[in-house]
């Protein structure tokens, strides 16, 4: 159920409707849009009894949402969600967001060397794993909080926004403290308690698609995060498992327009995990921009042969520079742009 307010409804009217929804035992989710505010209703186990809400001042109409997901749907919010960061950078607006960095933070020197080359390309976000979900329990599991501290330093030094994965509720608390964006990985896309905990966090969430998740399962995972009140969710297509073996996963680029049809949330593409092969990353990154993705997340390593995780799919820093240039050329075709590195970027904090 969704309450659509009149275009000129006042803040007080929105507040009164929210109070009435709370009084009925449900949870109101007011999402202001450019045209009008919509108030989603959750917390119901059966059909919502809107008990007189439709007659309240400022209410235009009360509509039933036809899909199982509510808050993520276009019915709830027609215009695209734009996620804003402290330094004015956005995801989901005109600017294409590019996130680049190593799969894992390995050493201080490695992290600084890669961050320097990432910043030099004008990319605004740095990724680096501190907690690694590995197939083998004997493989490198990440440096944990030490890596988070290093990335906090990188933010100060290079003005990069930090994106890193939380694998459980304990690491989520630390990631929320240190990073600018909380990544939830493919393996955890259906870890509902973690999704809900991220929904209570104060930082935007980057939600990666599960290894075999349908579009509806993907959107329902985002609904879990939003249902707890965190509306800053960015989806990420990172490839799904198919029968093919020429790539690690099959990058499902058709999910981008499919998501954009059904949801107002931004969606970015990960051609690194999506292909697993360095030589496929740039072609698929170009395709992702052309298909209308809101951004890219790619793994970069200055010495991928020695990387402790995902070296085979990590591109070299000079390839990242080419990728950014290619994205800059393609973006205008789909009404986007890649901001230039004008050398004026300053540290995000401090
Ligand atoms: C990663 O980004 O390094 C990662 C583990 O991604 P995914 O969850 O998509 O496998
Ligand atoms: Mn990786």
Image (cartoon, grey):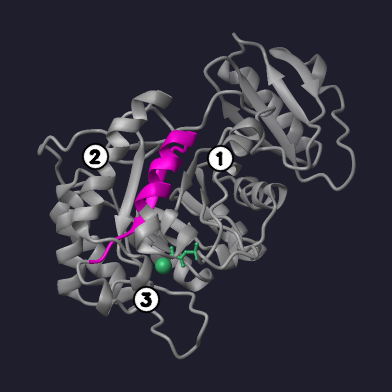
Range shown magenta: 282-301
Q: Is residue 48 above or below residue 155?
A: above
Residue in the picture at 35% in, 41% down: 97
Question: Quick check: is the Cβ at mark 2 less than 8 Å away from ligand 1?
Answer: no
Residue 186 point in image, percent of width and height: 56, 63
Residue neighbourhood size for the residue with mark 1, other residues' Cα within 10 Å, grouped as few (<14), some (14–19), many (≥20): many
325 or 340: which is nearer to us?
325
| Res. 124 visible in picture | no
Residue neighbourhood size for the residue with mark 2, other residues' Cα within 10 Å, grouped as few (<14), some (14–19), many (≥20): some
Numbered label attached to residue 256: 1
Residue in the picture at 68% in, 24% down: 16
Nearer-N-terminus badge (2/1)? 1
Residue neighbourhood size for the residue with mark 3, other residues' Cα within 10 Å, grouped as few (<14), some (14–19), many (≥20): many
* Quadrant position of residue 141: bottom left
Residue in the picture at 41% in, 29% down: 93
Q: Secondary structure at mark 3?
A: loop
Does 312 sit left or right of 134 as displayed?
A: left
Question: Quick check: is the Cβ at mark 1 less than 8 Å away from ligand 1?
Answer: no
Q: CA distance from mark 3 to mark 2?
A: 26 Å
Does the segment drawn in magenta span residue 20? Answer: no
Q: Is residue 223 above or below residue 78?
A: below
Circles 3 and 1: CB distance less than 8 Å?
no
Q: Which residue is mark 3?
A: 309
Q: Which residue is mark 2?
A: 325
Q: CA distance from mark 3 to mark 1?
A: 27 Å
260 or 276: which is nearer to us?
276
Nearer-N-terminus badge (3/2)? 3
Q: Is residue 12 above or below residue 227?
A: above
Q: Secondary structure at mark 1?
A: helix
On-image quarter of the N terminus = top right
């Amino acid at each position: 159920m969704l309450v659509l307010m009149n275009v000129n409804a006042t803040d007080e009217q929105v507040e009164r409707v929210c109070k009435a929804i709370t009084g009925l035992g449900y949870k109101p989710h007011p999402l202001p849009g450019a045209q009008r505010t919509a108030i989603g209703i959750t917390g119901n186990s059966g059909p919502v009894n809107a008990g007189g809400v439709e007659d309240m001042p400022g209410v235009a109409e009360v509509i039933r949402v036809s899909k199982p997901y509510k808050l993520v749907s276009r019915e709830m919010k027609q215009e695209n969600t734009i996620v804003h960061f402290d330094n004015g950078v956005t995801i989901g607006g005109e600017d294409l967001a590019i996130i680049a960095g190593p799969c894992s933070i390995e050493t201080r020197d490695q992290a600084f060397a890669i961050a320097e080359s990432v910043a030099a390309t004008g990319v605004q976000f740095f990724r680096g794993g501190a907690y690694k979900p590995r197939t083998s329990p004997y493989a490198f599991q990440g440096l944990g909080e030490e890596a988070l501290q290093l990335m906090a330093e990188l933010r100060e030094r290079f003005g990069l926004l930090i994106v890193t994965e939380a694998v459980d509720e304990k690491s989520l608390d630390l990631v929320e403290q240190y990073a600018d964006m909380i990544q939830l990985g493919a393996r955890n896309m259906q870890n509902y308690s973690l999704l809900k905990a991220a929904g209570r966090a104060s930082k935007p969430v980057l939600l990666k698609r599960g290894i075999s998740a349908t579009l509806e399962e993907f959107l329902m995972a985002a609904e879990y995060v939003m249902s707890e009140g965190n509306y800053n969710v960015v989806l990420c297509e990172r490839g799904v498992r198919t029968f093919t073996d020429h790539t690690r996963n099959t990058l499902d680029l058709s999910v981008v327009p499919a998501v954009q049809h059904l949801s107002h949330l931004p969606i970015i593409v990960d051609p690194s995990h999506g292909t697993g092969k360095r030589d496929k990353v740039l072609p698929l990154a170009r395709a992702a921009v052309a298909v209308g993705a809101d951004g890219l997340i790619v793994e970069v390593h200055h010495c991928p042969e020695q990387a402790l995780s995902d070296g085979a799919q990590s591109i070299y820093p000079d390839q990242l520079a080419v990728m950014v240039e290619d994205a800059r050329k393609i973006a205008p075709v789909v009404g986007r742009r890649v901001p230039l590195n004008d050398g004026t970027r300053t540290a995000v904090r401090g």
